[in-house]
Amino acid sequence: MFSSSSSVKQFKLAITCLAIATVFFGSLFSFTPTSEALTYKGSSIWRLSNGNVTISANAADVKVDMGWQIVKRDMTVKKCGIISFPYSRIKGTPSFVVGNARYDVSSLPVRSLPKCVDGALINGGVPIPTAFRTPDDKVVVRGFQSSTVLLQTLKGAVKTVKMNACSFGTLKSTTTLKIPSEIGVFGKWWEVSKLPITERNPTCREGIAKYGGMDGFAN
């Protein structure tokens, strides 16, 4: 059996080890930049001459709303000249385009899918909309003669920009996600073309931003 003094010492040792472990492992999984956020010409967001955008914040990362992005799909035209796709693909978006025609999502009527008989849709003499939504949540667009048609839908895109030890990170265009004309950061929309522009970012060394004679930057 342990003595009371021995138990107290062991308890204190265990608490100390637990605190050290919490700090150590917490630092591994919850990195926060060590320096204050930067500004360039008074703005916490600026653009580079290569087209990328730099954001500065005293946080591990920043969410950037990239707005609506166009998603293109070649759709196979089915019997009776129709295409169909899940309504979930356009839910919450304003519109979609099939071929050269644009359709408002909110204006789609709900109709049952007519029967296809000898290459024609039969609906008992009732007019059939060009585009409609079925009760089982499919979108149907009709009237195509070709074997395929291009469907363009919109998808909201959010990109995470990681901050470095000097509290800034760069948003870059990719082949699949281009930087749009406006981005949503810090609860507001920024027009990219009106952001202050610089040739390059400061160098970050051991959590300290080195400006190297660059004007306009401040902590």
Image: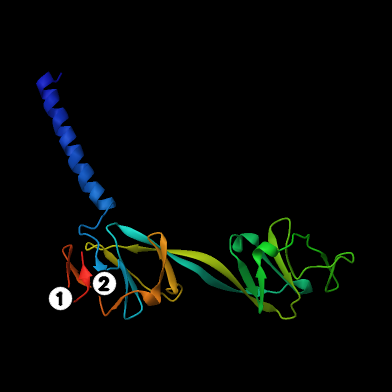
Q: Is 166 placed left or right of 112 in the picture?
A: left
Above or below for 169 versus 200: above
Question: What residue occupies the far right of the structure in this picture?
Answer: 125
The number of callouts visible is 2
x, y (%) of residue 3?
11, 19
Residues at marks 1 and 2, CA–CA distance in whole angstroms: 16 Å
Q: Which residue is mark 2?
A: 41
Amino acid marked by disc 1: Gly
- The answer to whether residue 3 shows anywhere in this view is no
Query: Observer-nearest residue: 34 or 23?
Result: 34
Tell me which corner region of the image, top left, top right, bottom left or bottom right, holds residue 62.
bottom left
Task: Identify which residue is drawn at 22% across, 73% down.
Answer: 216
- The answer to whether residue 211 shows anywhere in this view is yes
Q: Is 35 placed left or right of 131 in the picture?
A: left
Question: What residue occupies the far left of the structure in this picture?
Answer: 5
Secondary structure of the residue carrying numbered label 1: loop
x, y (%) of residue 48?
31, 77
x, y (%) of residue 80?
79, 73
Q: Earlier in the sequence, mark 1 or mark 2?
A: 2
Amino acid marked by disc 2: Lys
Secondary structure of the residue carrying numbered label 2: loop
Tell me which corner region of the image, top left, top right, bottom left or bottom right, holds residue 90.
bottom right
Q: In which quadrant of the rendered image does the N terminus lie?
A: top left
What is the number of the mark on residue 212?
1
Query: Observer-nearest residue: 1 or 106?
Result: 106
